[in-house]
Image: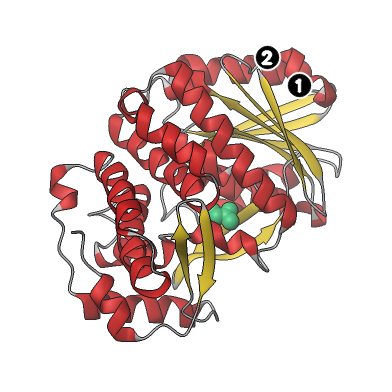
Amino acid sequence: MKEIKINTESRNYPVLVGTDILNENNLNEFSNKEILLVIDSKIEESLKKEAQITLSNISSKYSELILEASEENKSSTTLSIIHDVLIEQSYSRDCILFALGGGIICDITGFAAATYLRGVDFVLIPSTLLSQVDASVGGKTAINHPKGKNMIGAFHQPSKVLTDTKLLKSLEKVQIREGLAEIIKHALIKDKTFFKWLEENIEDLLEANDEKLLEAISKSIEIKAEVVSKDETEQGIRKWLNFGHTFGHAIEVYGNYKRFSHGEAVAIGMLMATNLSHKILNLEKAEIDKIKCLIRSILTDELVKSEFQPIDLVKLMSADKKKKGDNLNFILLSSIGEAQISSDIQESDIIDSIKLT
Ligand code: GLY
C-alpha cells in the first residue's frame, strides 16, 4: 500500500492507494466516532457489505444512506436528504461522513460535510477509476443547479481518502476508458516520463491489469497532489487540470449529456486543445502525433469519427464561461509535460482546432 500526502493550506491528509485496503487498520483514527455512510446504489453487494460491517463495527453511532448517482440527483434535494438524516439523528460536530461511490457521491457527500454545522469531517472511498484519479483528490465539493453543473459548492478537503483497486473489478470498459482520459491529462500537463510509460502500457491499462492500474493511479494522484498542494483554490496552476475541459464541457452539452460521457468528452476536448496548442504555442508535430495516438487508443472508432458544428461548440463554450463568471481561457501545451494558460485567443483559431484529425 502506498501513502500519498496532500498538503494544502487548509488541511494535510493522506490518500492510501492499494488493493483490499478497506479495513479497520486503516481507519483507526475514526474509532468511536459517529459515522454516516453514503453509498452509491451501484456498488456491488459484497463490497457494500464489507464497508457497512467495517464502519458499523468501529463507530459509536452508525447510519447509512443509499443514493442513486445521477447528474439530476446531484441536487439540493439530495443534499437535504443527507442533512435531514444528520439533523434527525442529532449527529454532532464531531461526526464523520463517509462516501463510497463515484464522483457524484464523493462531490455531494463532501458538500454535505462542508455545510453541516458549518463544516464536519469526511472520508472518501472512490469506486470508479475517474473518481480515484480526479474527484477524490483536492477537495472540490459541489451540487448542480438547474442552470449548470457544479454551480454550488465549496473547497473542503477530506480527512482521508482510501483508493482501493478492488472496487474497480466490476467496472465496465467504458468506465476504465473514462478514468484513463484524466490519467493521460495528468501526464500531458506535468510529466513527460509518465506519458512515455502510458504509451508503453496502454494496452494493459485498457485491459484493467491490476498492477499497471495501481501504478497509473498512484502516479496520477501524485501529480494532482503536487498541483493542488501548491494551489488549493484554483488561483493559478490548478487551472492546468482543466486541459481539454473547456472544449470537453461544451462537448458534453452538445451531446445533451447522453452522447458523450465526461471522460469521452474530455478525451475529445484534449484532441482539440492539442490542435490549438500547435497553432498558439507551436507544439511540435511529432509530439502532436504521439498525443493523438495515445488519446485515440482510449476512444472507440465511433467516437473518433464524431463531428461537430464548430460555431455551435464555440457558442456553448462562451455561454458556459459567462455563466460561471470566467474568461474564455484555454490550457495549452508547449510540449508534452509543459502546460500554460492562454487567453485572448481568436475565435477563428478555436474554430480551426475543432476537428479530430
Ligand atoms: N478536476 C479538476 C480539479 O480538481 O481541479
In this rendering, is residue 108 above or below 101? below
Tell me which residue sits at (55%, 81%) in the image.
325
Check disc 1 and give the amino acid type: Leu
Tell me which residue sits at (65%, 17%) in the image.
1
Residue 169 in picture, x, y percent from top left = 41, 19
Residue 93 in picture, x, y percent from top left = 85, 45
166 horizontally vs 170: left or right: right
Q: Is residue 200 visible?
A: yes
Label 1 CB less than 8 angstroms from ligand 1? no
42 horizontally vs 264: left or right: right
Q: Nearer the viewer, residue 256 or 300?
A: 300
In this rendering, is residue 117 above or below 59? below
Tell me which residue sits at (61%, 46%) in the image.
224
Tell me which corner region of the image, top left, top right, bottom left or bottom right, holds residue 207.
top left
Q: Are marks 2 and 1 in contact (CB under 8 Å)?
A: yes
Residue on which the image places disc 1: 27
Count residues near mark 2 (Cα–Cα under 10 Å), then give few for <14, some for 14-19, many for 20+.
some
Q: Secondary structure at mark 2?
A: loop
In this rendering, is residue 3 above or below 104? above
Residue on which the image places disc 2: 23
Q: Nearer the viewer, residue 39 or 13?
A: 13
